Image: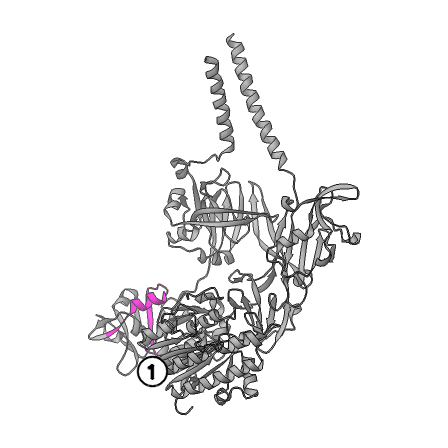
Amino acid sequence: MKYKQLFFYTAVLLIGLLSISILKATTVNSISTYTPVFKVIGDVANPLSINSYPEAISTKLQHKGTALSAIPLKLLLEDSQPASDFYDIYIKGSDGLMAMVHSSTIEESYIAFSEENGWEAIQLKHPISSNIKHIQEIIIKVEGESWDTGFNIISSEENLASYSIGELLTNGHTLQYYSEGTSRVADENKGYETTVYTTRRVLELSRLYQHSASDGILVIGSKGEETFFSNEGYLQLMDNSITYSTISREKRIDNVKGLVINPTIGRTTDAYYDSLHYLEQGNKVMLLFLDGFGYHQYQLAKAEGYAPFISSLPEASKVMTVYQPVTNAGFAAMITGKTPEENGVYSRQQKDMLMESIFGKATALGKKNALVEGNIKILNTETEPILNLDSDNSGTTDEEVFSSAMALLQVDYDFMLVHFHGIDDRGHSYGDTDTRTLNQIQQVDEYVRQLSRLWDGKIIIISDHGMHETDEGGSHGTLRYQDMFVPYIVYDGGEGQ
Amino acid sequence: MKRASILLLIAFILISSTACSTSNPVKGLEQEEIAAGKITLVGLEAAEVAVDLEELMTLPAISKEVTSVNSSGAENTFIIEGALLEELLKSKGKSQKSYTALRLVAGDGYSVEVPSEILQNRDIILGYRVDGEPLDEISMPIRAIIPEERAMYWVRNLEQIEFTGTKAEAAINEILFLEEAVNTYDSVDYTYYESVDSAIAGKDFFSAEEMSNGIIIKAKDGLLKSETAEVFNSGYIKHTGTDAPLFLSPDLPKGMHVKNILWFSAGERAYYSVASGLSITDRATIDDQEGIPLHRLFEELSINPSDSYIFTAADGYEVIIETADIEKGILFISEDGLISVKFDGLPKNTNVKGLFAIKTAQQ
């Protein structure tokens, strides 16, 4: 009886353990099937890596007499958030074959998966050659110009070229192999080494613009990062962006916005160093900040007689502002002497600088200082701004800022920064070279003249960014020469002016 | 009743066996296991150095979300917790940046060489927890992680780190005093704001070989800047007037200028401004003369250790000072404007006026 019981319990135990083993084996097998991945890349905000049917958007269809589960191409691509509603779709197979269809013709286009064909395009309305098998990637290339969102190449004189990421992915790069390192496994007798390489899509400068070996090429990142293109540097095309790296790994900029060829030596950051120098030498300094006043507007206003006073001053230097050419970033650069990478202000979203500004320095030097602003506080400066509302409803605060600054001239300030917003306001509304914008330049020119006559010290005229023309008027914030280059003038104020 | 108890026992065994086979085998790492897990550092010192987990855990812990990319491109994201190799080396008076390469060696014979580019620019984490849990059996005791590098460098079951070579770091063997040295170079007029000052071209100070690893410039305010030979050669050292000594160039943005230089060096040579040094260094006094203690100068420039040092005047006069006597010396500018040095308790002939250079005696 005892043996029978022992046999029974042992059997129960073995059956239990066997069941667990089978259960485990079944579980492993059920997930062991390999499904390849394909990507949706190019001019999209959200690159996709697809290795399964998103249940929510899959649908049933009949193809060549077979019932299939498939993803409508249109829904899939919407998920990748293309940069425009109109775009070319390049469907590329693992054998290199690529078919292009347009976004306006994909109402009956699908992507299905089968063991035989992998990820496969099934386009019921298109010629059969569009049905690419074993899809590796789908590249989106938007139509039209890409100056607002693409990879731009500019000089201080002109906009040289602009490319969308989709354009570069479909035609404009070379594949290169980079060693990632060598690993080794050794046994008692022998070592076995493997060197691993990655294939990278690399942009060749010679294919991007006609360049000379002596060009100084400044690489600009989306957060205002800057570095000169070095001998060991390269631009790598990623899924929806470009990365600059050096072989030595010392420098890397993700999301490169473009290149500036032979940038000016002068920068808007010079305003900080010049102001500090003159303050340390016992001079008074007034910084006249003409918002949205590009160098090309300065030239036009001079040529057409809209800036009689500024024209009478020494010729302005052309200086480059920082990326992104918007007020917060440009303003922070001019009062800290540093680029956004260092001062932390690279877009309209940041108000706090990571370092002391000229206001803090001036205070530390015992210099009485003031910041005369429009109706909003742009940055959290050490000195609180004196705000001025548009009380006469003229559409700009310039008159109020001017009156406020004139009143402050009665107080013995060592350093004043006066921020005129009107040229920027008119530029946005009417365009950078519109007569109404030029009229505002003329108005500000007169304010500058009057302030200059009453300021017994150094005066610096500067801007945070320029302006380019759009269908609606004007805009800035892109890597265009009109946005990036501004005038810079240093002169003596006083009765002589 | 008895049968029910036995069935319960079987059920317990089954549940236990299931639990054991699906949970982390090292969950709840025992103290002995912590103590047993160790890595060996080879080539760091004359003898091998063993480091156990307990020692690693006393170093500042770092926790970082990392994503590995394997050879097929698949990504895996997790949080690694561990200590930086650099912290471990710091505790032993070393730095990973000093080595030309190192090799991470796993217990199963796998190894990968980590080249200088990575050592100079990346953190190496010696990880002992993943997602808050101790490492799994195949990763114990340490998993090396190099964020931003591929998974081939993320070595599990790390047993050994071999340091395969030190970088030939140029230590300073010669200090030239800028105030005297400028008299030996051609100066040019340089317009700086409203004044015209004197400046010496950057390319005059060092040979191309000396500048092969760039130039380091330190300002009085502590700013330390590295420049390439190309940039330095394009500029000037302005040695008179406002903000001097000042590195500047008409071809460089003002943000790249360096005001009030304390010293600049390339290769084994440094130029030091005594005027700048006097304005920021605590002074010592010998016979009513205040000056910069020489040992502070040597510390500032990390001059190479030597049995003795040669002090040379602009007129060629030389004295040799034993290392033990360096701390008795001060550096100052005499009433007639000459860089001078004198020593407490040493013969008067060790005093040097118009001091041009100090060199290590073993060059």
Badge 1 marks a residue whose secondary structure is loop
Q: Residues within 10 Å of mark 1 (few under 14, many from 20)?
A: few
**Residue closer to the observer: B147 or A256:** A256
Residue furthest toward the left?
B287
Q: Is residue A227 magenta?
A: no
The percent coordinates of residue A258 (x first, y second) are 58, 68
Q: Write down the residue under mark 1.
A: A282
- Residue B48 place in picture, x, y as percent: 42, 46
Chosen colour scheme: one colour
How many circles with numbers are drawn on the protein? 1
Q: Residue at x 46, y 54 (%)?
A: B123
Residue farthest along the top direction in this orientation: A1
Image spot of residue A449 (x, y percent): 44, 87
Subunit under mark 1: A
Quadrant of the frame with the C terminus of chain B: bottom left
Residue that extends furthest to the bottom in the rendered view of this protein: A496
Asked if the magenta segment contains residue B310, the reply would be yes
Residue A263 visible at all: no
Q: Residue at x 43, y 51 (%)?
A: B84
Q: Residue at x 57, y 78 (%)?
A: A432
Q: Amino acid at mark 1?
A: Gly
Instruction: Quadrant for the N terminus of chain B, please.
Output: top left
Is A244 rendered above or below residue A487? Answer: above
Asked whether B319 or B64 is in front, the reply is B64
- Residue toward you, A324 or B243: A324
Asked whether residue B37 is in view, the answer is yes
Task: Say above or below: A41 vs B32.
Answer: below
Q: Which residues are magenta?
A: B290-318
Front one among A152 and A198:
A152
Q: Position of residue A204 (x, y in %)?
A: 64, 66
